[in-house]
Amino acid sequence: MPRIRIIKGVLHNFLDTYTSRYSDFDGYLIFGLLTNLEHLTIDLLCKEAATTEISPLPAAMLLARQRLTEQLSKAGLSISLLRQASLEITVLHDSAVGIVNGRPCNGRRVRFAVKVLAGGNGRNFESSKTVFIAPHNPNVEQRSTRAG
């Protein structure tokens, strides 16, 4: 039973970390740069070769894989424990207004749903989170000081 709780915690922490402000591209929230995205499924166990293309979409996919590996490691688990792992990102069609740096901005809600199949017992685990995402606007959004 403790391992079940640990995996559920890993998925929750993965979504919190992945959807946070620390998921950026060139110092800006990566999801605000993916304005044409409607739906994306990322295989979190795929070991694709490093891409030379520097753009938000491949960066978002690589970041998802890194964040899951980091959260598993923090929980003392190996990625080899998982037989399958995927992240579905779905932009919901209802428009929304949210606050970005103290200013109201138009945007949409985006649902992030992670699903994994654990190897040992073949059990499925799922977690999801919906967040407000505004399209990138450099006049409103502040660039992270982590940007190179």
Image: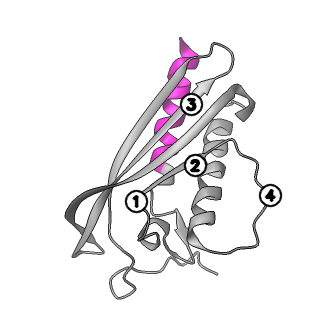
Query: Which residue carries the number 3 mark?
Result: 116
Q: Residues within 10 Å of mark 2 (few under 14, many from 20)?
A: some
Q: Residue at x 49, y 31 (%)?
A: 9
Query: Which residue carries the number 4 mark?
Result: 49
Circles 3 and 2: CB atoms closer than 8 Å: no
Task: Report x, y in % for residue 101.
Answer: 30, 75
Determine the secondary structure under disc 3: strand
Under mark 2, the amino acid is: Ile
Q: Earlier in the sequence, mark 3 or mark 1?
A: 1
Q: CA distance from mark 2 to mark 1?
A: 13 Å
Q: Residue at x 56, y 70 (%)?
A: 56
Under mark 3, the amino acid is: Val
Is the stretch drawn in magenta largely helix, strand or loop? helix
- Farthest residue toward the right? 49
Q: CA distance from mark 3 to mark 4?
A: 22 Å
- Membership of 27 in magenta stretch: no
Rendering quarter of residue 145? bottom right
Q: Earlier in the sequence, mark 3 or mark 4?
A: 4
Query: Which residue carries the number 1 mark?
Result: 38
Rendering quarter of residue 96? bottom left
Q: Residue at x 80, y 58 (%)?
A: 49
Residue 33 located left or right of residue 120: left
Look at the picture and state if 58 lies above or below 127.
below
Q: Residues within 10 Å of mark 4 (few under 14, many from 20)?
A: few
Q: Residue at x 57, y 61 (%)?
A: 60
Name the mark on residue 5: none
Determine the secondary structure under disc 1: loop
